Image: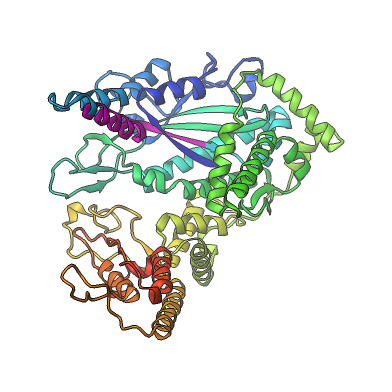
Amino acid sequence: MTVSMRVMSAGVGYDYLLKTVVAADGNRPLSTPLTRYYMEEGTPPGRWLGGGVAALGKGEIQVGDRVSEHQLQLLMGTGHDPITDQPLGRAFPTYKSQEARIEARIADLEPTMTPGAKGEAVAQIVAEETVRSTRRAVAGFDFTFSIPKSASVLWAVADAGVQALIAEVHYRAVAEVVAFMEREVAATRTGATAGDGAVAQVDVTGLIATAFDHFDSRAGDPHLHTHVVISNKAKTVLDSKWRSLDGRPMHAAVVALSELHEAVFADHMTRTFGVSWEAREMGRDRNPAWVITGVPEELVSEFSTRARHIDVEKNRLIAEYVAQHGRQPSNATILKLRAQATLATRPEKQVRFLADLTTEWRARATKTLGRDATMWARQVTDNDKPLLLRADDVPLDVIGELGRSVVEVVGEKRSTWRRWNLMAEASRQTMGWRFAAMQDREAIVAMVADAAELVSLRLTPPELAASPVVFRRSDGSSVFRPKGSTVFTSESQLAAEDRLLERADGAARNGREDHAQPRRGRPDARGRPSRRLDPHRSVRTDARRAGRPRRGGQYHMLVLTPPVPHPADRAPVAITCIILAVCPARCLRTGS
């Protein structure tokens, strides 16, 4: 992924920001080109980004202005305006620490308790509070935008002119994706404290962000990336009040943003240098990687020290998992083990001169290539002007076919999906196309996602009543329904679940035929025979019941606890549990 995100909490999160993201910022004017940082230790100073900065102070801050540490402390540390020091809406909430919660609960114990009873109660309180995580106020979101490794390698060994152009391509791609986030992702909620359940998700005027550029990985390899730290404070379009961002779409859109950013960066590189791109396989548990054609895999591997260390630790963790469980881990488990390996092998960040790093990188690349690395980079970036697509160049029948393909691929990974899942896969399937502008790519990806929605089955019920115009977005949707929250499935998913239900029917019938005893349960306390529950019928009943919408149009699942099975029904009950686990689409479908 070229985009990752971590939530930054107030206090601890701000300390992390200063130590790992802002650390080693140089005291240099922002207008200085990136290549001028060669003889400076550290990284370029942070800069303001996002349409929301215009609302700070009296408009003194402009996009691209340098961020001072004092301004950052006011915004991210206290939630205040970095110019006026006035609070932006409500203050960050404070939550009790684990120790404070334990002390408060112990103080509430009855004073008449015996020493033994009080000791047991205290032990239980400590045990309960130890497993609970401490809530922290969200100060912002740290989105890390990285360029593909092949592009980082090219940037690392190229001459100063090409380096500056690649860096500019990176900056433009980041700015365009942040602007996309402002249009499609960023939102806040109003009415949450009214107590009547009428919570509206409304648009914001823009994001307030700060961008910090970094050159290398923790292993000292070339890794051009930018930390975009987005403040949790945003001004609402509806009433111009300051509120907190809705974190749900910020989390849900990460994968789609990553796929879009990679494609947008590739478009910019092709427009600037005429380079082409190709997909290379990365193993069974990872998606193919898009790399610049002409950058050999040997060179990419040479500058992937962190990836090698992570893979070694991941393989060790997988071996431990197999020894403990007797089977190979699932793909989801492998991803978790890889994340664990990433943290376990994470070295301390070292601050070095970019000039020293570049000299070292060029020497390593020259040795791997067997020729001068800078001359090689000049040849890779010297190409004819490429042919680029406009949105109206793509036929509608191709878009429809891509939409069906997107649903097919997404359906192989999940039983239900939402808009952001379709957007991510649409970006993947159009990654091989090079577009003339961000607007063209954004339009095609949205059209493919629309086509995918058309061939999907909608599980979320429609709105029961029309909202007034003031409570509708520009696309006509109600603000009382979060953007991208509609749940979809497909006919093939339901057909597969039907086959599983049919097999369960067959197993249930066979179990009843093989057992000659009447279908009566054990007698109750008064000696009367109790009516036994057909476990498979209970699945169908529960599936129908689960399809009924709750208040607010949301579906809910009812947990079915099967009775103690009669010996003849043990197999059907086992299949009952399987059905409930693997047929969520069926259980969500009305009347199923």
- Say if 450 sits above or below 53 in the image: below
Residue at the image position 21 percent from the left and 61 percent from the top = 550
- Mark yes or no: residue 90 visible: no
The colour style of the image is rainbow
- Magenta highlight range: 117-144
Q: Position of residue 463 (x, y in %)?
A: 22, 63
- Is residue 523 covered in magenta? no
In the shown orientation, is residue 478 left or right of residue 432? Answer: left
Residue at the image position 63 percent from the left and 33 percent from the top = 223
Image quadrant in which you'd find residue 161: top right
- Mark yes or no: residue 543 visible: yes
Q: Residue furthest right?
A: 370
Q: Nearer the viewer, residue 287 or 395?
A: 287
Q: Position of residue 198 (x, y in %)?
A: 17, 50
Q: Residue furthest front?
A: 527
Residue at the image position 23 percent from the left and 61 percent from the top = 553
Image quadrant in which you'd find residue 181: top left
Q: Position of residue 170 (x, y in %)?
A: 57, 37
Q: Quadrant of the N terminus?
A: top right
Image quadrant in which you'd find residue 514: bottom left
Q: Nearer the viewer, residue 3 or 261?
A: 3
Q: Nearer the viewer, residue 385 or 130?
A: 130
Q: Nearer the viewer, residue 79 or 158?
A: 79
Q: Position of residue 153 (x, y in %)?
A: 70, 36
Residue at the image position 39 percent from the left and 21 percent from the top = 72
